[in-house]
Amino acid sequence: MAAGAQVKDPAFIAQCMRELVASAEEFPIKVEGTKTLPYSAVLVRADHGQIIVKLVRPLPPALAAGALFEMVFAAQDKRFEGRITFAGREGYLQYCFVWPKSLLASDRRLWKRYPIRPREDFQVAAQDSDIPGHGITGPLLNLSLGGLAFRVDRMLRLEDGMPIRPGAHLFERGKVLSLLRIRGLPRGEVLEARGMVVRVAEANSELVVGVQFTGLGEQEKVSLARLLETRERQASQSANALGVGIDPIDWPVGAQAMRAIGESLPDPEAPAAPAAPAGPEEAGLAALAALERRSTRLLVVSPPGEDCERITQLLQGAGYWRFETVPGLFEAHAAWKAAGDEPFRLLLVDLEPSRAEDLEPMGAVRHLEPLLRSFGAIPVAFVTRVPDAMLELMGRPGFGALAQEVGTGLGWVELLAGLLRGPAQ
């Protein structure tokens, strides 16, 4: 069926709707004629000309019955567009629509892509499902509600930290990525999901992999929608400033209209509401936490020099003042054994000296693991000069990765507190 062909066969349309129910695959719907961010929808029931869809975020409460929506979906190994009519609310985040009277064969992508500029420095860390498994990192190139594309800059064998030359043959279509983690998002958020490779391109010594999300939690979906809503707004404002024709219902005018009818997503540019003053209980807990940090003994493994000084400054900035520094793990082991009745509770290991041995940080960690076993179950935080997403794929409880150049995501206070608390029970 060629793109642009129209289908009015009721039996074919009903079959497509049943396929969507059976597959439980997400597809976008949006108010007809707008350019605002679509809603992620899943079809949960289809019968007698009506469909029940479940959304990630609610429709405006004042939305009137009869409002027209556009849907784009995949069925019968093709993509189709159709117009559905809002009929009312069915349950929590579930809504009833009249299904399309006709479908249009389409070459439109299911999800609009939002490009990521290099200076934004969004980084992807991924792990495939193979055993022993590979760690994959690189910059995010574009993002949508349905997936992402990123450039593969590094690949390591997670078992021993050995580098692997990236190649298209390692990313066949359908390959499962058991972990996808995006860092560098606004407000320090980290997006985690699972994915499946849907396309790969290799040209000019660059390897780009397109991934479809296959596992995204409800909170992650809301966070992603909020992020892309911001980008849609910024893109429309830029187009307006340049005099480019845009839909009059689009941002920023669309923002007012959407807020007026109760759009659920908050305005990302709005100032944060002032925090309520802490009560005596909260203030007391904060004081106790600060006191605990000041009294916790830490052991820092770093040769004397600028790196060691920077690490100690960051520790003090995070509220930790009781630490001892030693130049190497052998000296650390001696100090650990001599600690007696007041043991060290955490070990910080500077990985920068390993660069002299031309070891990747992950390779240095694997090299040090036999020595670290002699410290028992003490948690370990590995420190590099710049953030290294690959270290986050180590997959062992009690290990953490920190950087002297504090970026977005978990900082020193949060990560050290998490390691000291231990794994969740």
Image (spheres, rainbow, N blue to C red):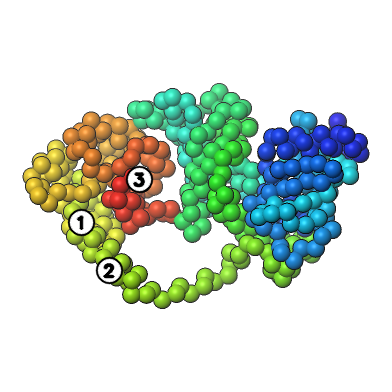
Can you tell which of label 1 and label 3 is closer to the viewer?
Answer: 3
Few, some or many residues within 10 Å of mark 2 (<14, 14–19, 20+): few
Disc 1, disc 3: CB below 8 Å? no
Which element type, helix, strand or loop, lies under badge 1?
loop
Q: Which mark is residue 425?
A: 3
Give the spatial CA distance, label 3 vs label 2. 25 Å
The CA span between labels 1 and 2 is: 14 Å
**385 sits left or right of 266 in the view:** left
- Residue at the image point whose x is 41% and y is 31% from the top: 156
- In-image side of 258 versus 362 (left or right): right
Would residue 252 be visible to someone looking at this image? Answer: no
Q: Can residue 397 be seen in the rendering of this structure?
A: yes
Amino acid beneath label 2: Ala
Q: In the image, residue 389 lies at what x, y percent?
A: 42, 42
Residue 158, placed above or below residue 226: above
Q: Position of residue 130 (x, y in %)?
A: 47, 25
The one nearer the camera, 299 or 420, is 420
User: Badge 1, how many Cα within 10 Å: few under 14, some, many 20+?
Assistant: some
Along the line of sight, which residue is nearer the eye, 198 or 57? 57
Task: Give me the residue at 30% from left, 47% from top.
Answer: 422
How far across and how far down the image is residue 54, in percent? 68, 49
